[in-house]
Image (spheres, rainbow, N blue to C red):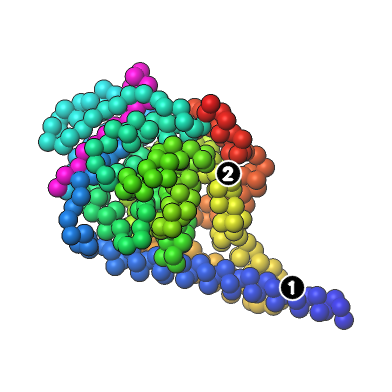
Amino acid sequence: MMDAELELLLVLLGAAFCIVTAAVHFISILIVTVRGRFAVGRIPAKLPAHPPVSILRPLCGLENAIEETIRSAYTIDYPEFEIVYCVASEKDPVIPLARRIMAEHPEVPSRLLVGDDRISINPKLNNLVKGWKAARHDWIVMADSNVLMPPDYLLRLLDRWVPGTGLVCSPPLGDAPDGAFGEIECAFLNTFQARWQLFSDAIGNGFAQGKSMLWRRENLDRHGSIEALAADPAEDAASTKVIRRAGLDVHLVHLPFPQPIGRRTLKAVWSRQLRWARLRRVTFPVFFCAELVVGGLFPIIVAAALATAGTIPFWVVAAYAVAWYGAEVLMAIGLGWRAGIRPTLALIARDLSLPVLWFAAVSGSGFEWRGNQMNVKEDSLAAAD
């Protein structure tokens, strides 16, 4: 009798797991898709005026599509803004390229600052310190060098600045991959990471992503200025905590800005995703714990186990799997993101790797970032001294 009761309990738990995970999966996709579709073609018009903005761009090396991404800032349609390039070393090969593009666009105020202020173990943050202090305007955007900036870039960021806002961000959106591993990178970035971040923002729990961050200077300066972002290994995690301690909210743009992926190796994709996972493990442990089960692998495995036990027919498992990934594909199509046969196969490859990535993230603390050996343990901040 006890065996029968245990078997029934396991069946009920398995069925509940499949239903709940699928419901959260479909609801998150629906909400993000509807919000994104509403924003397509919409002209932001909430601000009574367009405040001047300083765009800080940390540069490091001649990375993929760097000329395209640097040039994209000069297509921005906005009344008044400046671009401040930050480079850590005077020997960086990106400097001649940046200077040439600046010279081609004298109509846009642009500067290039060189130097490395060692306030943290985070090389990007160290590179940005001089830019923050030199920015001429009170509205400041920190934007990674590999972000493509469309003409409405600043308007879309400012459009999300509603009363009570302390920071507006955009997660990266993978685009233009070259090869299978580039597709897998896009599968991680788009309908998985960007989707969950946008969904979290939609339900009132927005958190920062360091690709594009719009600040009002006073919101950071009165809480320790840019040095306060050295409190965590990742500046975006520290930004979220600073803003929440101030009683303000972090909001995300409805439609993220693209990042050209290009050709990626398996090692590069794994290294980047492991770095982010280990940073999330330390900075937002509750959300990191949930990452183990939010992909499609475990729900489909549990559904298959129920079919093997004779609880449901196998065609239901097949339909469940098709619906799971079909919803992601429809979301990508609806928002103009990567879609097709290869991107769909990349979704499956991504979910197969998620448990391996999760356990790798909890089994160590070190990672490499732009040639710098780093560690996510709390005492690793001492490495900046």
144, 333: nearer the viewer: 144
Proximity of marks 2 and 1: CB atoms separated by less than 8 Å: no
Question: What percent of the width, then of the height, locates residue 97?
Answer: 26, 26
In the current view of this chain or complex, which residue is farthest to the right? 1
Asked whether residue 178 is in view, the answer is: no
Q: Is residue 334 left or right of residue 299?
A: left
Which numbered disc, 2 or 1, marks the residue closer to the eye? Answer: 2
**Residue named by callout 1:** 10
Q: Does the magenta stretch include residue 86?
A: yes
In the current view of this chain or complex, which residue is farthest to the bottom? 1
| Type of the residue with mark 2 | Arg
SS label for mark 2 = helix
In the current view of this chain or complex, which residue is farthest to the left? 107
Q: Is residue 161 left or right of residue 151?
A: right
SS label for mark 1 = helix
> Which of the 4 image quadrants contains residue 259?
top left
268, 199: nearer the viewer: 199
Q: Earlier in the sequence, mark 2 or mark 1?
A: 1
Q: Which stretch did the figure color magenta?
A: 79-94
